[in-house]
Image (cartoon, rainbow, N blue to C red):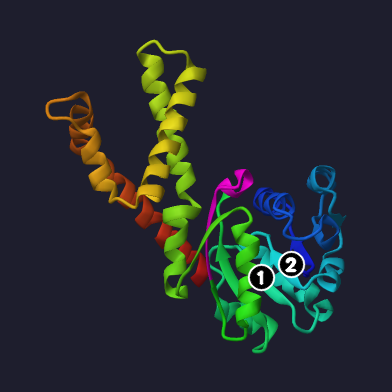
């Protein structure tokens, strides 16, 4: 792809995305630039991927055909005010923060601004990210494809209507945290039964990875795959029964509801 890509902010999510972009050879490393107020993250990402780095956000704006705003939501207004005079004419602005709507971005950047709203997640760091995106009407099909390629370099992508974007944190953006809690609980359960912790975490994590691949690669309904593991009168159905008695699925859905409500509240604020 013959584009220059800039990141304003170089935290965990930005570094995960940069890793995917560079490792996939989507663009040359010299066509990627990142800014950050402190040196530590910039030094790390430059050493790892040999990209351009700077502490000056305006330098990123001047350099980039695609600018990815990788700062906290409350920083967006300050950063946009800083870089707006220096942005290229046809620059594509990509957001990755919860609660920042296309309308709000258009109000900040102008009605002709090209804006794509996205929601990636941290497994991008290992090339297994899940991202969702939507765009405003100023984005051309070619520009959308360019941004899709960026996000496909570190995982899978779905295009959604913006009205569904606030649901994304609950199902993919924040859900790795729920899964880590599940893996930790599985590990604790195995340790309780006498298994060494390192082996317990490895076996639990691989089981989660394998189960996820079964859902994606077979296309079967998760309920059917669950049923296939549950032999009549066996150990698995006994465990499933205990989870159901303790409202396992209801607790997960309630957690997702809380996550979505928070995302909507952040947008309103």
Q: Is residue 246 above or below residue 69?
A: above
User: Between marks 1 and 2, how big is the CA–CA gap?
Assistant: 7 Å
Residue 51 left/right relative to 235: right
State the residue at coordinates (25%, 40%). 226
**Does dot 2 land on a helix, a strand or a loop?**
loop
- Residue 26, quarter of the rendered image: bottom right
Q: Nearer the viewer, residue 237 or 121?
A: 237
Is there a contact, CB below 8 Å, between mark 1 and mark 2?
A: yes
What residue does disc 1 label? Answer: 146
Q: Which mark is residue 1?
A: 2
State the residue at coordinates (79%, 67%). 4
State the residue at coordinates (20%, 33%). 230
Q: Residues within 10 Å of mark 2 (few under 14, many from 20)?
A: few
Stretch of the chain drawn in magenta: 123-133
Q: Nearer the viewer, residue 216 or 258?
A: 216
State the residue at coordinates (60%, 63%). 96
The percent position of residue 58, horizontal first and vertical second, equals 85, 69
Q: Residue furthest front?
A: 218
Q: Residue furthest bottom?
A: 111
């Amino acid at each position: 792809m013959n584009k220059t890509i800039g990141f304003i902010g170089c935290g965990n999510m930005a570094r995960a995305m940069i890793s995917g972009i560079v490792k996939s050879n989507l663009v040359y490393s010299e066509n990627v630039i990142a800014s950050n107020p402190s040196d530590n993250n910039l030094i790390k990402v430059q050493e790892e991927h040999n990209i351009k780095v700077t502490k000056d956000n305006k330098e990123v704006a001047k350099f980039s055909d695609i600018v990815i705003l990788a700062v906290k939501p409350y920083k967006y207004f300050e950063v946009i005010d800083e870089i707006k005079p220096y942005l290229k004419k046809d620059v594509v602005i990509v957001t990755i923060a919860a609660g920042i709507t296309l309308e709000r971005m258009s109000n900040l950047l102008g009605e002709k601004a090209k804006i794509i709203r996205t929601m990636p997640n941290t497994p991008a760091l290992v090339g297994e990210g899940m991202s969702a995106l939507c765009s405003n009407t100023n984005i051309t099909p070619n520009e959308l494809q360019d941004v899709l390629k960026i996000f496909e370099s570190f995982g899978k992508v779905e295009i959604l209507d913006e009205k569904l974007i606030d649901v994304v944190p609950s199902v993919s953006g924040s859900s790795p945290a729920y899964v880590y809690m599940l893996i930790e609980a599985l590990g604790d359960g195995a340790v309780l039964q006498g298994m060494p912790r390192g082996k317990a975490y490895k076996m639990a994590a691989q089981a989660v990875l394998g189960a996820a691949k079964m859902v994606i690669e077979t296309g079967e309904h998760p309920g059917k795959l669950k049923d296939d593991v549950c032999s009549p009168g066996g150990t698995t159905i006994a465990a499933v029964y205990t989870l159901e008695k303790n409202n396992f699925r209801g607790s997960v859905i309630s957690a997702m509801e809380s996550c979505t409500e928070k995302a909507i509240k952040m947008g309103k604020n």
